[in-house]
Image (cartoon, rainbow, N blue to C red):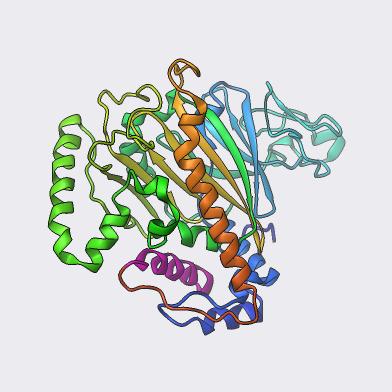
Amino acid sequence: MDGTTPQAPAPAVMAALAAHQPGRTLPQALYTSPEAFAADMAKIHRKHWLFAGYGFEIPNPGDWFVYTVAGAEIIFARGRDMKVRGFHNVCRHRGSRICLEGHGHSSVLACPYHKWSYALDGALLLDTAKEFGVPKSELGLKQVSVADAGGLLFFSIAENPPDFSEAIETIGRKMKPHALHRVKIAHQAEYRVKANWKVVFENNRECYHCPTNHAEYNLTAYDVERDRAVMDPSLLPAIEAIVAKANERFAALGYDTGDASSNMTGKNWRCHRTPLKEGFVTQSLDGKPVSRLMGDVKEWDSGTLRCTVFPNFWQHTNCDYACAARLTPISADETLVRGYWLVDKDAVEGKDYELPRLLEMWDATNSQDWVICENQQAGISSPAYEPGPYSTLRERNVAHFVDWYLGEMRG
């Protein structure tokens, strides 16, 4: 067993999965128990496609970075052929880690223990046949599957990953105007959220909580108005008219079109352009640009391209910047969230953007969400917790996420 093949969850976890009532939150154990966390890692994170980082982070042959999730530490390296590959950070000699830093540049990947060295395509360079009795062709680094979706790097640890081709094609096509190969990270933040990764993702999947928690976010997006229209259908024609007008503009610019909803495109992913509120050209507190136009976008107000992939990624891409989150489960009650703020590679801080203004909308929204998630996790951990009902109108996307999760775990 190499750790990439899903195993049957422990009996207590299977019992919790069986106990779930449709239309309600998950049983307590699935949010709090170490056994459920281990099952999540085996059945979800070691099987599905995960977001690792961006192609622009490793632009040149020999550039690499390391990402650790679900017990696996993966090196992402750009080869001399410019292809990005992923390798387990494990020397084939005696198992030492090879890359000891988070990122770097190397002409070869050399183990610090005995200096066994590997080419950027993972092939072992040492001739081992005579001394070790094994040909070097059998001792290359163990690879993982890697896919580039318009500059977003996804990978799967599984030996036989699920089909992700539609998502890769769609995300790559819709992300193209934003040219993520020609952007840079203006700011990066690490948030340690004391909540289960599912609690964090459930929070992302609805805006029922937005009116009372996200004053900054509510200024820019139609999520709250969409929910109001769900509750009062007489409001829907006005929103549909705004969306139709925005889509005419998007189509004229050569962009994809969408609506004001946050429904999934596929079973566990979406890539969906939605308009901003009238008078807003980007997600900022006053609706005005916070940086120069990014990538190949030529006009202000291209809406927001929302990209979400279960179980660890979402990104909002505007005309002038993008903000993203990568979720790394740490334990049953802790999740590490890396926040990214991207701008055009030629944007100059102090001239094209001011960092406080670039960060203000999403940093506030993120911080508000982490408080919400931590409060929910604390309540779920109480002996008084029992699964509560989802709104059939305003929490359908949360129920969709939970149904996907349950299907993967039971399958």
Q: Is residue 359 above or below residue 158?
A: above
Q: Which residue lies at the image location 37% right of the left edge and 28% below the top edge?
A: 320
In the rendered image, residue 360, in percent from the top left (x then y), is placed at 48, 37
Where, by quadrant of the figure, is residue 45 drawn?
A: bottom right
Residue 156 seen from this side: no
In the rendered image, residue 16, in percent from the top left (x then y), is placed at 58, 80
Q: Is residue 274 above or below residue 46?
A: above
Q: Is residue 392 magenta?
A: no
Classified by dominant secondary structure, the portion drawn in magenta counts as helix
Where, by quadrant of the figure, is residue 261 drawn?
A: bottom left
Q: Nearer the viewer, residue 350 or 79?
A: 350
Q: Which residue lies at the image location 40% right of the left edge and 74% below the top edge?
A: 390
Residue 235 as seen in the image, left or right of residue 275: left
Residue 290 as seen in the image, left or right of residue 378: left
Q: Nearer the viewer, residue 336 or 285?
A: 285
Q: Is residue 406 magenta?
A: yes
Residue 121 seen from this side: yes
Q: Quadrant of the N terminus?
A: bottom right
Write the start and end of the magenta stretch as one range: 394-411
Residue 269 as seen in the image, left or right of residue 20: left
Q: Is residue 199 above or below residue 22?
A: above
In the rendered image, residue 72, in percent from the top left (x then y), is placed at 68, 50
Q: Is residue 398 above or below residue 362?
A: below
In the rendered image, residue 398, in percent from the top left (x then y), is placed at 41, 65
Residue 402 as seen in the image, left or right of residue 57: left
Q: Which residue lies at the image location 17% right of the left edge and 60% below the top edge?
A: 235
